[in-house]
């Protein structure tokens, strides 16, 4: 099939109104190719990331119970209301983990790196549609649909609750629901008409709880086990600072014990060095590992050459998603970088920031189809891979 025919087929299959509200994309006649070695590595990554979440969950709970240092829970709870802390510590959710795991992966000259993890990700419906539209894709045509439906019990009635904050993703969630059949439906954040045994997919952020009208009812029902909810309301598992905890030298033995040496070393290769911007003064003889700074204010004085670093909010904030808070030091003038550093230090008590070593994506080329000229156009760009891993429900 020629490129024109394939591109028109894909365009014709787009749902009316698209998949993301207010967004359109260029269309390529063929999916982006991945090397077999990378494909194999990605296919084995899911179990490693699930193990990472299990370890991070244990680390927080042990810290909250004084079995690990207090500062771990203090970092992960900083800036959060007591109601959120009580919710995530509730015994009803003790053993629960996210059932959808999506890393953000950059292809670099050195290989590939995971810059973030998302356990309440958008794009499930979009990726499911793409898998249907293109041939020879990883996970096959039904992979996303089967994966998502598999995180619920086969007989569950499933409500996908989409908040106003997440309304951009409403069209893709409606498409997803239609594909999965009558057991699935989309509801807004005022819905409370749940029946005993129903399941809810939480597609809203926990910082947005004041705007989720049904939240009190929803979590009360989940606490009583009359409904099931995923992702569980554990805000600490939605923090980017988990990567800073992974790199914290004081916790090296913990990660090696819980992940095993093999998984720890694999993650060390792909997770960039990450720090939390905690302005607590260091002892006079101490320095921040890997940066050799004695206090965070010195970060502002680094030369542009030495600013291959990214600042971004850790989580629990409306600016913490969609790259809204991302500041790349090498791209900013000195004054703007200094302002970003000052803000990160200032906001530590209410909205902590992290610093991450920047791994520059490599430039690749791929064709898109111009429907006006009826021709393929080569486009240079950088790739962010977003594989989805689903944790099936077994009972």
Image: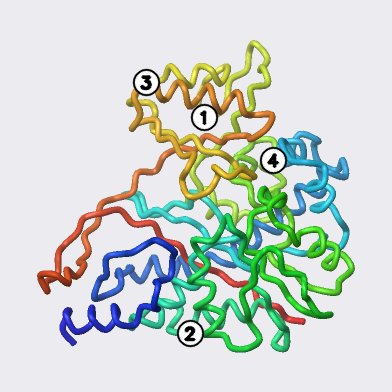
Is 214 situated above or below 311? below
Labels 3 and 2: the sequence-earlier one: 2
Q: How crowded is mark 2: few (under 14 residues within 10 Å), some or many (20 or more)?
A: few
Q: 138 left or right of 347?
A: left
Q: Residue at x 61, y 74 (%)?
A: 186
The residue under label 2 is 142
Mark 4 vs mark 2, CA separation in Å: 40 Å
The residue at which mark 3 appears reads as 334
Residue nearest the viewer, comparing 226 with 292: 226
Question: Residue at coordinates 24% horizontally, 75% vertically from top-left?
Answer: 29
Q: Mark 1 points at which residue?
A: 290
- Using a 10 Å C-alpha cutoff, classify the residue at mark 4 as few (fewer than 14 neighbours), some (14 to 19) or many (20 or more): some
Q: Look at the numbered discs 3 and 2 and tell me whether their residues touch, using CB distance below 8 Å.
A: no
Gap in Å between the C-alphas at discs 3 and 2? 49 Å
Horizontal and vertical percent position of residue 191? 72, 69
Q: Distance between the residues labelled 1 and 3?
A: 22 Å
Closer to viewer: mark 1 or mark 3: 3
Q: Position of residue 125 (x, y in %)?
A: 49, 73
Residue 192: tell me if it is visible: yes
| Residue wearing tag 4 | 251
Any mark on residue 362, and which? none
In which quadrant is the C terminus drawn?
bottom right
Residue 335 in percent (x, y) is at 39, 19
Q: In the rendered image of this protein, does residue 355 appear above or below residue 242?
A: above
Q: Which of marks 2 and 1 is nearer the N terminus?
A: 2
């Amino acid at each position: 099939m020629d490129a024109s025919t394939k591109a028109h087929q894909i365009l014709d299959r787009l749902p009316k109104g698209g998949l993301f509200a207010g967004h359109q994309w260029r269309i390529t006649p063929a999916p982006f190719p991945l090397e077999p070695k990378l494909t194999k590595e990605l296919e084995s990554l899911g179990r490693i990331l699930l193990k990472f979440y299990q370890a991070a969950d244990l680390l927080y709970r042990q810290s909250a119970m004084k079995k690990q240092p207090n500062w771990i829970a203090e970092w992960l709870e900083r800036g959060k209301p007591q109601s959120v802390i009580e919710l995530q510590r509730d015994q009803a959710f003790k053993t629960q983990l996210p059932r959808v795991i999506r890393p953000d992966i950059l292809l670099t000259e050195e290989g590939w790196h995971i810059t973030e993890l998302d356990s309440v990700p958008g794009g499930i419906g979009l990726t499911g549609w793409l898998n249907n539209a293109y041939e020879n894709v990883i996970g096959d045509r039904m992979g996303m649909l089967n994966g998502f439906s598999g995180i619920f019990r086969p007989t569950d009635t499933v409500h996908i609750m989409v908040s106003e904050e997440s309304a951009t993703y409403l069209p893709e969630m409606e498409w997803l629901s239609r594909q999965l059949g009558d057991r699935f439906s989309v509801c807004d954040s005022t819905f409370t008409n749940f029946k005993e045994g129903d399941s809810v997919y939480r597609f809203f952020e926990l910082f947005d709880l004041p705007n989720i009208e049904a939240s009190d009812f929803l979590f009360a029902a989940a606490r009583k086990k009359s409904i099931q909810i995923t992702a569980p309301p554990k805000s600490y598992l939605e923090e980017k600072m988990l990567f800073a905890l992974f790199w914290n030298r004081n916790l090296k033995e913990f990660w090696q014990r819980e992940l095993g040496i093999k998984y720890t070393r694999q993650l060390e290769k792909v997770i960039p060095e990450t720090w939390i911007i905690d302005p607590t003064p260091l002892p006079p003889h101490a320095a921040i590992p890997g940066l050799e700074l004695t206090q965070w204010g010195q970060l502002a004085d680094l030369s542009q050459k030495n600013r291959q670093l990214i600042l971004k909010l850790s989580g629990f904030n409306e600016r913490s998603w969609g790259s809204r808070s991302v500041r790349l030091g090498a791209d900013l003038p000195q004054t703007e970088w200094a302002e970003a550093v000052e803000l990160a230090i200032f906001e530590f008590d209410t909205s902590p920031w992290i610093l991450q070593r920047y791994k520059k994506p490599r430039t690749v080329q791929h064709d898109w189809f111009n429907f006006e000229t009826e021709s393929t156009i080569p486009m240079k760009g950088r790739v962010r891979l977003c594989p989805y891993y689903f944790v099936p429900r077994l009972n």
